[in-house]
Image: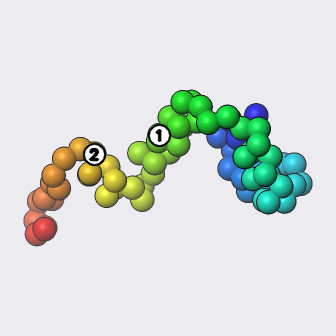
């Protein structure tokens, strides 16, 4: 349930007290790969400040900013 709510492995470990290895094992066995999880992951990627390059790939050619050369 925590992972489905968007919690990361370190966040789950902080709540449950399990090791990262145990959490990963549990998630591998019981967490279904759903469209909802995929959409949450893509939203995180698209909204991250560090994914400017990926966002530009999706939206077209590089836009030159005023006063800056390519």
Q: Where is residue 40 in the image (x, y as percent from the top left)?
A: 54, 37
The C terminus sits in image quarter = bottom left
Which label is found at residue 16?
Answer: none
- Tell me how far mark 1 sits from mark 2, CA to CA: 13 Å
Q: Is residue 2 above or below residue 19?
A: above
Q: Which of 28 and 36 is in front in this view?
A: 28
x, y percent for residue 35:
54, 30
Where the N terminus falls, by quadrant? top right
> Relative to the observer, which residue lies in front, 34 or 18?
34
Question: Residue extending furthest bottom?
Answer: 69
Q: Do the residues under discs 1 and 2 have CB atoms within 8 angstroms?
A: no
Judge the density around disc 1: few (<14), some (14-19), many (≥20) Cα neighbours within 10 Å. Answer: few
Q: What element carries label 2?
A: helix
Q: Which residue is drawn at 89% across and 54% down?
A: 17
Mark 1 residue element: helix
Residue 14 appears in the picture as rendered: no
The residue located at (87%, 48%) in the rendering is 16
Residue at the right extreme?
17
Can residue 27 be spotted in the picture?
yes
Would you say 14 lies left or right of 60 here?
right
- Is 22 located above or below residue 37 in the figure? below
Task: Bin the neighbour count of mark 2 within 10 Å (Cα to Cα): few under 14, some 14-19, many 20 and up.
Answer: few
Q: Is residue 28 left or right of residue 36?
A: right
Residue closest to the far front: 29
In this rendering, would 1 be left or right of 35? right
**Which residue has dot 1 on it?**
43
User: Could you tell me which residue is drawn at 23 percent across and 44 percent down?
Assistant: 59
| Total marks placed | 2
| Closer to the eye: label 1 or 2 | 2
Residue in view at x 11 percent, y 69 percent: 69
* Residue 4 placement: quadrant: top right
Question: Which numbered disc covers residue 58?
Answer: 2
């Amino acid at each position: 349930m925590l992972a489905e709510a968007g919690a990361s492995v370190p966040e789950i470990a902080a709540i449950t007290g399990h090791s990262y290895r145990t959490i990963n094992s549990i998630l591998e066995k019981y967490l279904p790969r759903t469209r909802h999880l995929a959409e949450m992951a893509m939203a995180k990627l698209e909204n991250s400040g560090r994914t400017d390059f990926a966002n530009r790939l999706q939206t077209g050619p590089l836009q030159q900013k005023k006063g800056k050369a390519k």
